[in-house]
Image (spheres, rainbow, N blue to C red):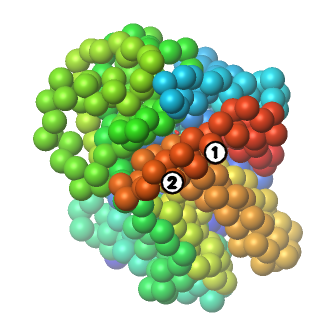
Amino acid sequence: MDAVRTRVAIVGAGPAGLLLSHLLARAGIDSIILDARSREEIESTIRAGILEQGTVELLDDVPGSRARTVGSRHDGIELRFDGVGHRIDFAGLVGRSVWLYPQHEALRDLIAARLADGQDIRFGVTAREAVGAESDTPTVIATTLDGEELEVSADFVVGADGSRSVVRTAVCGSHGGHFREYPFGWFGILCEAPPSADELIYSNSPDGFALISQRSPSVQRMYFQCDPDADPDALSEAQIWDTLQRRVPGATLHEGPIFKRDVLRFRSFVARSLTRGRMAIVGDAAHTVPPTGAKGMNLAVADVVLLAEALESLLSGGDASLIEIFDERASARIWKAQHFSWWMTSMLHAVPEASDFDRRRQLGELRTVVESEAGSAYLAEAYTGWPL
Ligand code: DHB
C-alpha cells in the first residue's frame, strides 16, 4: 500500500476537477487529482460543445486555452417550429454570447496547462471509497493500474467523479436525491459535411425534436429525439438523414458520411446534499441535467467557482462559513439550470403520449417565447449563463 498526503484530494479529471485544481493552485493550495481513465480516453470522449460566456472568461485565465481561437462565438440560436425559423438574438437581448468549443478540446487545454504547472494528476487510478468525512483527515482509497492500493489523505476531499461518483456515496449515503426520467433520448451523429447553418438550430417538429450543431467547417454534430433504448447501429445512414431532414422542416441539411453515432439518455438529478464535513461533490457527481441547452459542463464550472472560494477561506483562512453555505449557494443555480434544461426539453420535444391539446399548447409556448421580447430575453439570459 502506498500513501500520499495533499491538501485537497480531487477525484475526477473532468472539467470540474481540473478547473478546481487550477483555481486552488492560484490560491497557493496543493491538490492531487485521481481519475480511473487514461489521459487519451479523457481527451477523446465526445461531449457537448457550448460554453457560456462566464465559462470562457474563466478559461481565459488558463494558459494556452484555445476556446476563443479554435472555438467560435455564437451570438444567437434559431428556434424552429411550424416550418419557420426564429432567431433568438443573444447579443441584442442580453449583450452576452456563447462559444461553440467541444468539451474534449477544453479538457485538452486544461490537462496540458495543469501538467505544465506541475499539477499531480494520477491517470488510471480508480477511487474505490472515500472515508473520514467527519474527521480532519478525509481519505480516498484507490487502486492503481498495477492493482496496488493507494491512500490519498487530505484536508478536504472533492468528488468531481461524474454520475457514478464514489464520493457521493460518502456524502449522501445510498439515499439518492431528486430524480426525474424522460421518455426519450437523443440519437447523436458526427458527420463530414459543411455546416448547414451559421448558428445552432433547435427544431420542434410533429415527428420530434432535432438539434443541428457544428464542430468545425468540415465536421458537424447533429442530434434527433429517439427512443431511450434505441440501438445506435440499427439505422442506415439514409434512414438517419431522412429522419434529420424531416425533423427540420423548411430547411435543407448538408449531408455527408457519418463517422460516429451514439444514444444519450435523459435524466434530471440533484443529490440530496452536496457536502458532509470535509467532503463535497460537484458537477455530474452532484447533479445531472438533460442535454437540451447544454448546461452540464457550465453548471460544473459554476459549482467549482463557489467551492474554490469556500476552500480557500477554509484552508488558508481557517474560516468554515463559506463551506457551510456551499450547498445552499450552489443549489440556487443548480435548480435554475434544472428548470431551464427541463423547460427547453419539454418545450421542444414531442412527448409520445401527447394529446392534440398538448401539441397546440406547446406551439403556443414557442410562439410566446419568440414573439415576446421578455420571453426571448429569458431564454437568452439562461442560455448564455447567469453571472458567476
Ligand atoms: C450541443 C449539445 C447540446 O446539448 C446543446 O444544447 C447544444 C449543442 C453540441 O454538442 O454541440
Left or right of 306 on screen, residue 170:
left
Name which residue type carries label 2: Asp
Q: Secondary structure at mark 2?
A: helix
Name which residue type carries label 1: Glu
Left or right of 18 on screen, residue 224:
left
Q: Position of residue 344 (x, y in %)?
A: 57, 47
Left or right of 32 on screen, residue 212:
left
**Disc with the residue nearer the chain's start (1 vs 2):** 2
For label 2, the crowd category at 10 Å Cα-Cα, with few meaning under 14, some 14 to 19 and many 20 or more, is few
Label 1, label 2: how many angstroms apart (C-alpha)? Answer: 10 Å
Which residue is under mark 2?
358
Q: Secondary structure at mark 1?
A: helix
Q: Position of residue 383 (x, y in %)?
A: 67, 40
Q: Are marks 1 and 2 in contact (CB under 8 Å)?
A: no
**In the rendered image, the vertical position of residue 269 relative to residue 17, given as above or below:** below
Residue 285 visible in rendering: no
